[in-house]
């Protein structure tokens, strides 16, 4: 048995006709008044009951506008402080690591054997190594943060 358009006995419905009927129903729906208008006569002097509600036809739906990106957040004054503190901690840790590596290399190489004492140059290196790497860590962390924020479009400087 063929169940195409021939078997149903109806002509295939045109989409344009259906849209025109829906548009006419929608215009009728908008044109009907829900409140009594002054020009309408009121029978019996009483309140005019609203007309019976009909199921509205399909409403045309306007396309939504494209989503816009959220507005940029204001730069927090605490962000550079946090980034600087992180750089300070990482710089101190890096200073201790470098200091230990230099000390192990000097003792393993035999530079400090012989009982001559500790050379003044090495004492100065060990004294200034950790604070220097801590300050360098703060500077590097702030520069990296500024570059990341500038590339992300949230402003720098």
Image (cartoon, rainbow, N blue to C red):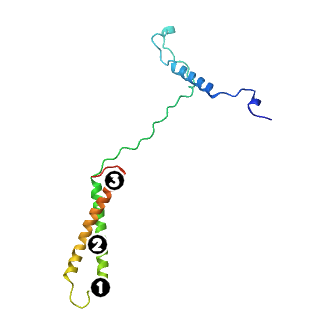
* Among the 4 quarters of the image, the one containing residue 3: top right
Q: Secondary structure at mark 2?
A: helix
Mark closest to the chain's N terminus, 2 or 3: 2
Picture residue at 25% right of the left edge, 66% below the top: 135
Using the image as rendered, state which of residue 16 and residue 7 is in the foreground: 16
Q: CA distance from mark 1 to mark 3?
A: 44 Å
- Tally of numbered tags: 3
Q: Which residue is mark 2?
A: 95
Relative image position of residue 146 (x, y in whole percent): 30, 56
Q: Are marks 1 and 2 in contact (CB under 8 Å)?
A: no
Picture residue at 76% right of the left edge, 30% below the top: 6
Label 1 packing within 10 angstroms: few (<14), some (14-19), many (20+):
few
Numbered circle sitting on residue 107: 1
Horizontal side of 26 relative to 7 (left or right) equals left
Q: Secondary structure at mark 3?
A: helix
Q: Is 112 situated above or below 143? A: below
Picture residue at 51% right of the left edge, 18% below the top: 31
Q: Secondary structure at mark 1?
A: helix
Q: CA distance from mark 1 to mark 2?
A: 18 Å
Numbered circle sitting on residue 149: 3
Label 2 packing within 10 angstroms: few (<14), some (14-19), many (20+):
many
Relative image position of residue 111 (x, y in whole percent): 27, 86
């Amino acid at each position: 048995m063929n169940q195409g358009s021939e078997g149903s006995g109806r002509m295939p419905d045109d989409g344009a006709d259906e849209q025109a009927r829906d548009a006419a129903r929608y215009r009728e729906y908008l044109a009907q008044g829900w409140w009594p208008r002054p020009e309408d006569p009121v029978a019996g002097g009483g309140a005019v009951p609203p007309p019976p509600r009909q199921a509205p036809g399909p409403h045309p739906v306007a396309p939504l506008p494209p989503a816009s990106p959220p507005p940029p957040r204001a730069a927090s004054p605490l962000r550079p402080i946090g980034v600087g503190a992180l750089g300070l901690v990482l710089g101190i840790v890096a200073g201790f690591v470098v200091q230990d590596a230099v000390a192990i290399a000097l003792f393993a190489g035999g530079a400090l054997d012989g009982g001559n004492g500790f050379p003044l140059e090495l004492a100065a290196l060990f004294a200034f190594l950790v604070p220097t790497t801590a300050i360098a860590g703060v500077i590097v962390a702030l520069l990296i943060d500024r570059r990341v924020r500038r590339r992300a479009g949230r402003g720098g400087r």
